[in-house]
Image (cartoon, grey):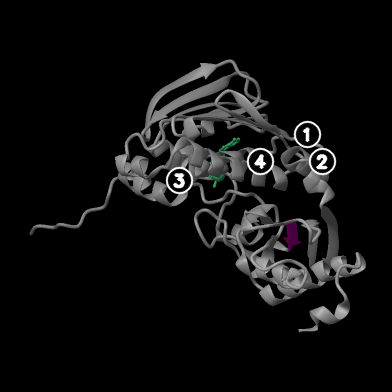
Amino acid sequence: MTTYIRLLDDKTINKIAAGEVVERPASVIKELVENSIDALSSSITIEIKDGGKKYIRVTDNGTGINKDDIELAFLRHSTSKINNIDDLQNVMTLGFRGEALASISSVSQLELITKTKSDMSGSQLVINGGIIKEKNEVGCPDGTTLIVKNLFYNVPVRQKFLKSNNVESSYIGDIIYKLALSNPQISFKYIKDNKMILKTPGKGNLISTSYSLFGKEFVDSMFELKYSSKGLSIEGLICKPSFTRGNRGYQHIFVNGRYIKDEGISRVIEKVYKSLIPINRYPVFILFIKLSSNDLDVNVHPTKTEVRFSNRDYIESNVFTCVKNLLTTNNLIPEVILES
Ligand code: ADP
Ligand code: MG
C-alpha cells in the first residue's frame, strides 16, 4: 500500500505556523517586548537596524529564564504562563500561547542571553532556523536580551513581501508607542540605526508618558478621563474637539493592558464627537478599559489584537456615557444634540 499523506516534521510545522505570529519585524518586536513586560521588567530597550529586517535587539531587566528552561522556551506551545485551558479564563499575562519564541527562532538567526537572579551565571543560546547552534555559559546582568538577525532569511517568499526600511520602521514605531503607552510604569528606550528615537520616564503616569511620546501640544489638547461602573473601569486621555486627525491611527484602545483593535468602540466614541468635528475627521484618544478577565476572551486570534467581550453592549454604552459626560461637563455639547 502506498500512502501519500504524512505528518510534517516539527521544523516545518514551526516555519508554517510562524506565518501567523510573525508577519514582519514589528510583530517580532511586539512578541519580544510583551515577553519582557510579562517578565516584570522596569526597563526595556529596543534597538533595530535596517527596518528591523537585519537586526532587532530587545533587552530587559526582568526575571530572566531559568538555566534548565532555556531550550524548552523555544519549543512550540511551551509556556510558563498557563497550565491548562481553565487558566485562560484568568490570564493576566500578555502571552500564553507559547508560540512566539518557537516561531521567531524558526525563521531567523536568533541569540538569547539571559540570567535569573538566583543563577550564578548567565546562559547564551544561538539558534539558526530552529536549530540550536551554540549553548554557552556567559557573564551577564540579570534579565534577558534577545537578538533577532536576518528575519525570514530561510523563507524567501516572506522576505520578498517585506516593505522598505522606512515602512517597516514606521510599523515598528507604531507598535513601540502602543507598548510604551500601555505600560507607563516601564521605561522604554528605542534606538533606530544608532539613533535614540524615544525614551519614556517609566514613572507610572500616562500624562508624562504621553508627553515624552507625543509632546506638549498633544497633552494640552487632551482631557483626562476617569470613570467606573459595575465591573468596569475606563480611563485615559481623549481629545478636545479642536484636535482631530484624518484617520483612526491615533485611536488607542487597551483592554486589561492589552492593545486591541475594536471598531465598535471607536464608532461609539466617534458618535459622541459627530456633531462637534468636521466630516472625515476622527477623534484622538488613548483609552484603557479594565474588566474582569472572565468577561473577556483574548484567545480569538494568534496576534491577540482582537478580543471578544461577553457583554459588548454594556461596555459600549458605558464608553458612550463617560465620553459624553466628559464633553458635557466641559460645556462642549448641549444635551439635546445627543438625543438621536
Ligand atoms: P508565551 O509568551 O506565550 O508564554 P513565548 O514563546 O513568547 O510564549 O515564550 C516562551 C516562554 O519563554 C515564556 O512563557 C517565558 O517563560 C519565557 N520567556 C520568553 N521571553 C522572556 C523574557 N524576556 N524574560 C523572561 N522569560 C521569558
Ligand atoms: Mg510571548
Q: Is residue 154 above or below residue 263?
A: above
| Callout 4 secondary element | helix
Residue ID for mark 2: 208
Identify the residue at horizontal 61%, vertical 18% (top origin): 140
Q: Earlier in the sequence, mark 2 or mark 4?
A: 4
Q: Which residues are magenta?
A: 285-291
Which residue corresponds to mark 4? Answer: 37
- Of residue 87 and residue 292, the one placed in the foreground of this image is 292
Q: Quadrant of residue 15?
A: top left
The nearer-to-camera label among 1 and 4 is 1
Which numbered disc flags the more N-terminal residue, 3 or 2? 3
Q: Amino acid at mark 1?
A: Pro
In this picture, residue 101 sits left or right of residue 288: left
Q: Which one is closest to the eye, mark 3 or mark 1?
A: 1
Look at label 4 and name its amino acid: Ile
- Numbered mark located on residue 201 in the image: 1
Q: State the CA–CA distance, disc 3 to disc 2.
A: 32 Å
Label 2 environment density (alpha carbons within 10 Å; few <14, some 14–19, many ≥20): some
